[in-house]
Image (spheres, rainbow, N blue to C red):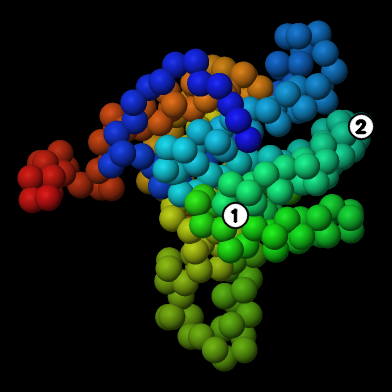
Amino acid sequence: MTAKVTAEIPVAADNCPRHVAIIMDGNNRWAKAHRLKGVAGHKAGVDAVKAVVETCAREGVEVLTLFAFSSENWRRPKDEVSALMRLFLIALEREVRKLHRNNIRLRIIGDRSAFNPALQEHMEKAEALTRDNTRMTLVIAANYGGHWDITQATRKVAEQVKAGQLEPSDITDDLIQEHLSIGDLPMPDLLIRTAGEQRISNFLLWHLAYTEFYFSEVFWPDFKSEQMLKALDAYAHRQRRFGQTDDQIAARAAQQ
């Protein structure tokens, strides 16, 4: 996995986000701007994924979560959905060994039941191959929705209550979070959305409570290493308060 960086932007090591989440938007608009079919934009977007994965791993990001296919994307034209499924399968076959060689763990979150058996099998094999890798965790959200994630987590908790394993008074934020798809990983520090849109589109609804947002006008296929570094640099200059005042933040910094 290689990518050329045209402009190096320094990112403070102590201000690097542990977890970056990205809504990869603009593939179709990129294709339209280049007078190509929509699937061409998705294919070009794969190159952006490679560049961003490499950049985040190099900069010390621990977790990178990419919104690849939402639960609402099934509403798109059937030929586009079919092309996306083929592209997803091809990407799994071609790229997973590169991830493994670079010590990157792959996790896929979302409701897999809607995918065909061959794709489900490749998902399982890819995760198994990379399970013990430690450099970075790459999370792919496929047929994923924030509502679905919270619903399936609360259903599991309800089943424990029904079985007598829990009392309703035992239910806490932490307990629900344990049952979320990536509840065991750090919460996202930075959310990036490309292509100028400024909404979260049912993505990681629980997880984004205190996340910093960064919106880029660049279409996803053109969001490469330089743009990723700009986003990390913007994050490095944010002050995260988590409900505290500026004075409290300053006092805490002085004690460190």
Q: Nearer the viewer, residue 122 or 192?
A: 122
Q: Which residue lies most toward the bottom here?
A: 164
Q: Amino acid at mark 1?
A: Arg
Horizontal and vertical percent position of residue 132: 58, 63
From the viewer's perspective, tell me whether residue 247 is left or right of residue 146: left
- For the N terminus, the image quarter is top right
Q: Residue at x 43, y 66 (%)?
A: 173
Q: Amino acid at mark 2?
A: Asp
Q: Nearer the viewer, residue 152 or 24?
A: 24
Q: Residue at x 62, y 19 (%)?
A: 222
Residue under the image location 62 percent in, 85 percent down: 162
How many marks do you count on the picture?
Answer: 2
Q: Residue at x 73, y 56 (%)?
A: 126
- Up-down: is 55 above or below 252? above
Rendered view: 86 above or below 97: above
| C-alpha separation, residue under disc 1 versus residue under disc 2 | 31 Å
**Can residue 153 be seen in this snapshot?**
yes
Secondary structure under badge 2?
A: helix
Q: Quadrant of residue 235?
A: top left
Q: Quadrant of residue 213?
A: top left
Looking at the picture, does residue 98 appear above or below residue 6? below
Q: Say whether disc 1 or disc 2 marks the residue closer to the N-terminus.
A: 2
Specify whether 111 is left or right of 104: right
* Disc 2 crowd, CA 10 A, few/some/many (<14, 14-19, 20+): few
- Disc on res. 79: 2
Quadrant in the rendering for residue 95: top right
> Residue 108: x and y, percent?
67, 54
Comparing marks 1 and 2, which lies closer to the viewer?
A: 1
Quick check: can you spot residue 149? no
- What residue does disc 1 label? 105
